[in-house]
């Protein structure tokens, strides 16, 4: 049934900022921060990209908010369609094409986001569409997933701006930042309630029915709604160190320890979220 999974909208920012990655490297690799010159930025950035890709494959989770197209060859025999690479954020559409290439939208389902793998589930007494489908990628499930969702802040209106906003009023979120600071008045680790959602903007409250939180500036660095799973974050650090050292000297053998460590780390059931 499963045909392919395509990332139709890649992350707009890196999960780890350049500045934060450089700090990681001074701790994990035998290198002084002064040695990380601007001309090394490309190598550091490539290490971050490679580490994020490895983390997603090994842990089976999406790190930074991304859009996906899941293509199916046929409707499932059961009542659900699993959505890979969680955590799931929102579903845009379920579309299918008949043998004469007509396009239809299917909406007689609900989303089960309580399992390790989120699912599109048929409503009670409903059935998948009948009829012949076209031969190539006849069914597409378009959805969004990611541990961390980038945002920017407008201190004049106390709004957070989120491209392709997946949040609704009443959702709970925590904030995180890489390579900078949150807007003054917002805190990491604190649980906030989403309110005043309007398109790609929202406000936060400290209580379900409380007033919107105000903040004094726009912050700095990469700002996120959500947090990277600590176990995945550790794997990212291991991989960034290994990939950066490899880029400096592909012939050296000492980097193998990082790849072994990352492989063992991501193989753990706890990192994969297996209970």
Image (cartoon, grey):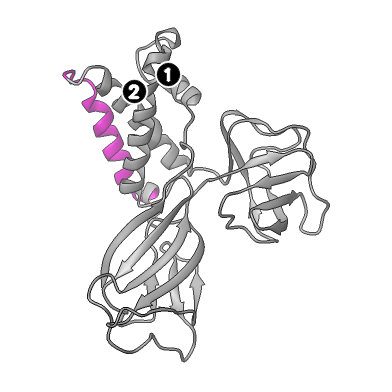
Q: Which residue has dot 2 on it?
A: 43
Q: Is residue 259 left or right of residue 165?
A: left
Is residue 131 depicted above or below 74 in this figure?
A: below
Residue 28 coordinates in the image, percent (x, y): 38, 21
- Say few, some or many: other residues with alpha carbon within 10 Å of mark 2 (under 14 / 14 to 19 / 20 or more): some
Asked if the residue under mark 2 is in contact with the one under mark 1, i.e. CB atoms within 8 Å, the reply is no
Q: Which mark is residue 232?
A: none
Identify the element where label 1 is drawn. Answer: helix
The N terminus - image quarter: bottom left
**Residue 172, picture quadrant:** bottom right
Taking the magenta stretch, the answer to whether it contains residue 54 is: no
Residue at image x 34%, y 73%? 139
Magenta region: 251-270
Residue at image x 31%, y 78%? 101
Residue 197 coordinates in the image, percent (x, y): 70, 58
Identify the element where label 2 is drawn. Answer: helix
Point out the residue furthest to the bottom here. 125
Residue 148 coordinates in the image, percent (x, y): 52, 46
Residue 241 coordinates in the image, percent (x, y): 34, 25
**Residue 81, picture quadrant:** bottom left
Q: In 3D space, how far apart are the residues under numbered discs 1 and 2 (Cα atoms)?
A: 17 Å
Q: Which residue has dot 1 on it?
A: 27
Q: Is residue 35 left or right of residue 107?
A: left
Is residue 1 depicted above or below 162 in this figure?
A: below
Is residue 78 depicted above or below 113 in this figure?
A: below
Residue at image x 70%, y 58%? 198
Closer to the eye: label 1 or 2: 2
Q: Is residue 8 left or right of residue 185?
A: left
- Say few, some or many: other residues with alpha carbon within 10 Å of mark 1 (under 14 / 14 to 19 / 20 or more): some
């Amino acid at each position: 049934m499963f045909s392919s999974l395509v990332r139709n909208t890649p992350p707009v920012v890196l999960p780890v900022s350049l500045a934060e990655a450089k700090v990681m490297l001074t701790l994990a690799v035998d290198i002084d921060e002064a040695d990380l010159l601007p001309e090394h930025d490309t190598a550091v950035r490539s290490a971050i990209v490679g580490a994020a890709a490895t983390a997603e494959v090994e842990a089976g989770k999406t790190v930074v908010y991304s859009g996906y197209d899941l293509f199916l060859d046929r409707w499932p025999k059961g009542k659900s369609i699993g959505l890979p690479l969680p955590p799931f954020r929102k579903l845009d559409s379920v579309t299918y094409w008949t043998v004469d290439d007509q396009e239809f939208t299917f909406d007689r389902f609900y989303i089960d986001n309580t399992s390790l793998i989120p699912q599109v589930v048929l409503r009670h007494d409903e059935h998948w569409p009948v009829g012949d489908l076209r031969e190539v990628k006849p069914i597409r499930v378009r959805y969004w997933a990611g541990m961390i969702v980038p945002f920017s802040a407008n201190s004049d209106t106390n709004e957070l701006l989120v491209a392709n906003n997946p949040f609704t009023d009443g959702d709970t979120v925590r904030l995180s930042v890489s390579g900078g600071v949150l807007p003054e008045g917002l805190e990491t680790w604190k649980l906030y309630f989403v309110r005043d959602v309007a398109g790609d903007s929202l406000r936060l409250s400290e209580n379900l029915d409380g007033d919107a939180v105000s903040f004094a500036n726009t912050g700095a660095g990469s700002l996120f709604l959500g947090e990277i799973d600590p176990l995945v974050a550790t794997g990212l650090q291991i991989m960034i160190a290994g990939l950066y050292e490899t880029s400096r000297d592909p012939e050296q053998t000492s980097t193998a320890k990082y790849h072994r460590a990352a492989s063992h780390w991501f193989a753990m059931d706890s990192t994969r979220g297996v209970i």
